[in-house]
Image (cartoon, rainbow, N blue to C red):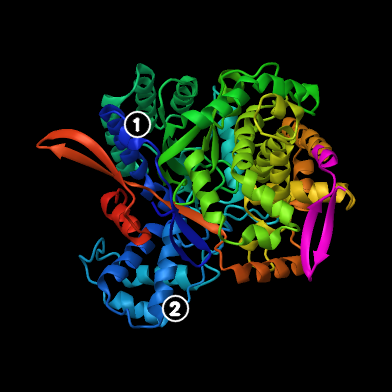
Amino acid sequence: MEVFAEKFDDIKILRYEIPGFEKLELKKKLYIYYLSQATLAGRDILWDQHGKYNLYLRDVLEAILLNVKDQENPEWQDFLVYLKKVWFASGPHHHYSTDKFTPSFSQQTFKGWIDQLKVGNNNISQEHLDADNIQILLQLIFDPEFCAKRVNTNPQSDLITTSANNFYEGVNQAEVEDFYKMQKENAVNKKISFGLNSKLVKRIEVEEEVYKKGGLYGSAIEVIIENLEKAKDYTENEEQVQIINALVNFYTSGDLESFDEFNILWVKALSGDIDFINGFIETYGDPMGRKATWEGLVQIKDEEETKRAEIIAKNANWFEKHAPVDPQFKKDEIIGISLKAINAVTLGGDCYPASPLGINLPNAEWIREAHGSKSVTLTNISNAHHKASLSTGFSEEFSFSEKEVELEKKYGSVSDNLHTHLHECVGHGSGKMLPGVTSDSLKSFGSVIEETRADLYGLYYMYHPKAMELDLIPDLDAAKAHYNSYLRNGLLTQITRIKLGDKVEQAHMRNRQLISKWVFEKGNNEVVKKETKDGKTYFVIQDYDKLHELFGELLKEIQRIKSEGDYEAAKNIVEGYGVEIDYDLHKEVLERFEKLKVPPFTGFLNPNMNLVKNGSELVDVEVDYNTNYTEQMLKYSKCFNTLKAF
């Protein structure tokens, strides 16, 4: 299988393999197949959550692609790139920066293409071609001020009215804060994740439209439920039946108490090789950190890599006890922690095409403290990343010495996986908040602080003697390789993803820069040294032991901020270290990166999964990797068209 599929603009598309799928028994294959169908069925939900006009935009762009014959026009290639970017981001805003794309084709040309469309072309209805609606569409594509940013995190502005996402309508930030403050005060159960699965709108009064069967996104949720019910016939054990029943109950009722009940069952279910995520999970897409985007993932256990991962989970209490943080912020006992290395089978929603490398759930703090959490690292996704990176020249360009390059090639994959294991299991699974402190105490800075905390746990412990004792790393050089690459990324290479002059916006990027800039500053150019060679800037670690200590010092403060809900301290440390980019350094890095012709962002194609029948009998599920990006996107739009633009 060829890993690389194609590249366009700032994106490369890769393929990932599912090792051993063909050897699975038929029952497991069918369980995976129907879970995968349920994962793909939620695609339109994310598109609509990302923007109220996004499904309309996709319908028109795809209709132009399939019905307009203007391939000789020089602007046609620009149109194709724009469409591919919109597919990738599930809308017209960049998946990382959330800034709106600027098209390279003209409004006049685009209007001419629309004029060639007719009712019946793909999903095109009379409403699609209505003059007023077309005007909105033209505004969406060509007016830089209209729906300019999907997620605005600038605390100086109204986060709701300046964000183009579709979680709120007719309300401002103060009204949102007041609504959920009152909702929580009036609730008997104050533990639920208020507002997680709803859109907040103001008609006459402010009210919630809940995502559920028969409610908002009901037609998509019905297809998800239908495939979950089919999957239930092929489960590996009774626990999986109960989990599916609980999830269906949540999707049917929309009741957040039932979502918590599902999560408790899910986190306790550790038997079986197959698992899945399906639902409204992460809140990064909401500047208030309250509304969750829809995502899905089907996974199968990687037996070999899981052995290493389980060592970490079994020693979670040791890691918690010896963490360099104030004892009052430590859990008395970590319970229910599990860590598996898995191979992704199907990515969906907010996990597709850009995939996470690791996941730790559930997000509800009280469930984590009382019942534990599940962590997974996606081995085949990580391996595909690593294979694709070996021939780019990226490491050679930004590493100060050949030794750094050699360490990266030798240990990069191993150390990346270890840091992800520690980040997901020890990082997200540790620590506690003081009484009265809630997960939304840090407001818009909560996600950055939590990701910073998890990264620091991983960085601190991978260089700790315990890592060697447990045989998690072959030698300290593996940890050094990761320290090199982490700081190189946090101080240099991740800003290749950001336009010159812009600030760091995305939570994970902010956390990596925060950590890297903080240790660089505190080390006074002695622990990490800024070097210049041939007019190029590098950051070179001088003292790994001292760097390890600095990671511990920062972890202590970040855990305090999280545990105490210290908003001002969170704001100061994030804005002081995680947001601003030195203009001259940024310009230099972008110029160096441009010469490599390597897109900074990566997405993945799902393997195709097909039922094989002998008459009416299901006899096999076949997997093939013979698809390209455009084919897969058009297939999903046709086969999983669960929501309508109008």
Q: Whole-percent x and y of residue 392?
A: 57, 61
Does 125 sit above or below residue 353?
Answer: below
| Tag 1: amino acid | Thr
Residue 252 bears which disc, if any? 1
Residue 564 is covered by the magenta coloring = no
Give the quadrant of residue 269.
top left
Q: Residues within 10 Å of mark 2 (few under 14, many from 20)?
A: some
**How many angstroms separate mark 1 from mark 2 (CA)?**
44 Å
Q: Is residue 158 left or right of residue 348?
A: right
465 or 208, which lies in front?
Answer: 465
Q: Is residue 623 left or right of residue 168?
A: left
Please tell me which residue is depicted at 44% across the width and 80% down the height of the picture. Answer: 106
Horizontal relation, residue 558 to residue 59: left or right: right
Task: Please tell me whether residue 105 is drawn above or below residue 166 in the rendered image.
Answer: below
Query: Where does residue 221 sit, x and y in percent of width and height?
Result: 33, 39
Secondary structure of residue under mark 2: loop
Residue 346 or residue 130, whichever sits in front: 346
> What residue lies at 26% left-to-right and 41% top-to-bottom?
622
What residue did someone put label 2 on? 105
Label 1–label 2 contact, CB within 8 A? no
Residue 385 drawn at (x, y percent): 53, 50
Vertical relation: 245 (above or below) 568: above
State which region is magenta. 527-548
Amino acid identity at mark 2: Phe
Secondary element at tag 1: helix
Toward the viewer: 279 or 301?
301
- Residue 129 seen in render: no
The answer to whether 138 is drawn above or below residue 36 in the figure is below
Which callout, 1 or 2, points to the residue nearer the camera? 2
Q: Is residue 300 left or right of residue 646?
A: right
